[in-house]
Amino acid sequence: MDTRSRIIAGLVAAPLAIGTLAACGAGTTGSDAKAAAAVGSDAKGAFFSAYDKTGDSKRQRVTTKLEASPDTIIKLASSMGSGSGGSTSTPSVSPKIAQLISGSSIVVDMQSTGAALKDETDPTKINTAMSWKTDSDLFNLRTAAQDTFVKLDLAKIADQTGAFSMADVQGALGQAPSWIKDAVNGKWVGFDKGTVEQLAKSGGAAASTNPTQLTPDQTKQLTAAVKSNLDTNGTFTSEGDTVKVQVKIQPFLTQMFQDGKRIAPKQFTDQMVKDATKSLTELKAGSVLAFDATIADGRFTAVKGDVMQVLNWFDETKAKDAKSKKELQDLKAKNLHLTLVSQISELDRDVTKPEGARMVTKAELEQLGGMGGSMGKSSSGSGSASAVPTAPPAG
């Protein structure tokens, strides 16, 4: 594996691990929460006590964002995109897009209509809402009462990125069904449970499942596995209301993939686990993943860590050639910081169906082509039932 591939893999692994820890540590705090109490001398005990209170509530919100300036994002993208340590004269990410990334957040709301979130294993009782936000919503995906809803505001994305114009979009849409035009113009469109099930049956058994989506029961098992893994491979120190954690990254991620293969074999395939395990053997011995977990009222309120710490996982002296060694040295010399922050808070409302959503019928979806054998002439899409939007896994 070359230097850039190693770094890219690390830049995926670090937020994956931090994001997993945030999701597993998604407790709630009341709106009238008292000031954060000091963690005390037993940092490990405080951490796992908070961990055990994960999802005690039936409603919660996790807001994830990058704390990085647009300039940092441009420098990093140029370094990774050029393949020459960032020697290109033109940035691979425009200032407007860098500003969008810097100012964006992903907000995930979850509500259980049954047991507490950490205990509910029936996916039909979990409602979720995901939003990509800047100063307004750019994209929304929601499931409620087993129906799925989507809304995309392309005009705002065009304005904030400068990457395309709405005139081009409207021209490309041409004779597309009106519900597609509604969906990309910031209006809610929905797919009811019955329609999705009928389309899945029309598309065959393969279309009726989503192999990449974890069930609540799998999420619960993985949460327990991550806790055990942290207990084995983590060290914990306290600093006020924050527990500072350092995790031995090689054994932690190795065990994480093994647990994933055992609990969710469709998501963690043999080849993926094999490739990941091989990549982990190339990390520098003693590499650690460091992150901070803030605790208030005995629960996690935030998890944060610098994604760029992955650069220290690689030893440039072991690079396969002089060019790869220089690329890694140059990137380290830039001293860039890209902090991933997940804030965990109480959700003060239910996750419900959006008002005024246009419900798309089976017949309207079949107009896209190929669905149930009734299409095939449209160029708008493949007609696979897998094209129907599905919600992100709860938790």
Image (cartoon, grey):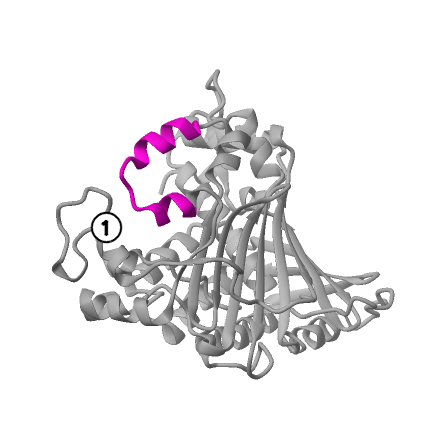
Q: Is residue 285 something that shows in the picture?
A: no
Q: Secondary structure at mark 1?
A: loop
Count of number-bearing discs: 1
Quarter of the image for residue 312 reads top right
- Residue 201 percent location from the top left of the image: 21, 71
Kindly identify the residue that appears in the image at 31 percent across and 67 percent down.
Answer: 195
Question: Is 119 placed above or below 10 here?
Answer: below
Q: In the displayed structure, does residue 163 sit left or right of residue 95?
A: left
Crowd rating for badge 1 (residues with CA inside 10 Å; few <14, some 14–19, many 20+): many
Residue located beneath label 1 in the image: 368
Kindly identify the residue that appears in the image at 52 percent across and 70 percent down.
Answer: 127
- Residue 109 percent location from the top left of the image: 58, 63
Kindly identify the residue that appears in the image at 43 percent across and 30 percent down.
Answer: 166
Magenta-drawn stretch contains 386: no
Question: Is 91 placed above or below 295 here?
Answer: above
What segment is highlighted magenta in the picture?
165-183
The kind of secondary structure the magenta stretch mainly shows is helix
> Tag 1: residue type?
Leu
Q: Residue furthest top?
A: 89
Q: Is residue 127 something that shows in the picture?
A: yes
- Residue 116 percent location from the top left of the image: 60, 80
Viewer-closest of 29 and 248 = 29
- Residue 215 percent location from the top left of the image: 42, 74
Magenta-drawn stretch contains 177: yes
Question: Is 24 placed above or below 2 here?
Answer: below
Q: In the displayed structure, does residue 84 sit left or right of residue 205?
A: right
Q: Quadrant of the N terminus?
A: top left
Kindly identify the residue that appears in the image at 49 percent across and 61 percent down.
Answer: 142
Q: In the displayed structure, does residue 144 sit left or right of residue 193?
A: right
Viewer-closest of 391 and 174 = 174
Question: Is 350 placed above or below 167 here?
Answer: below
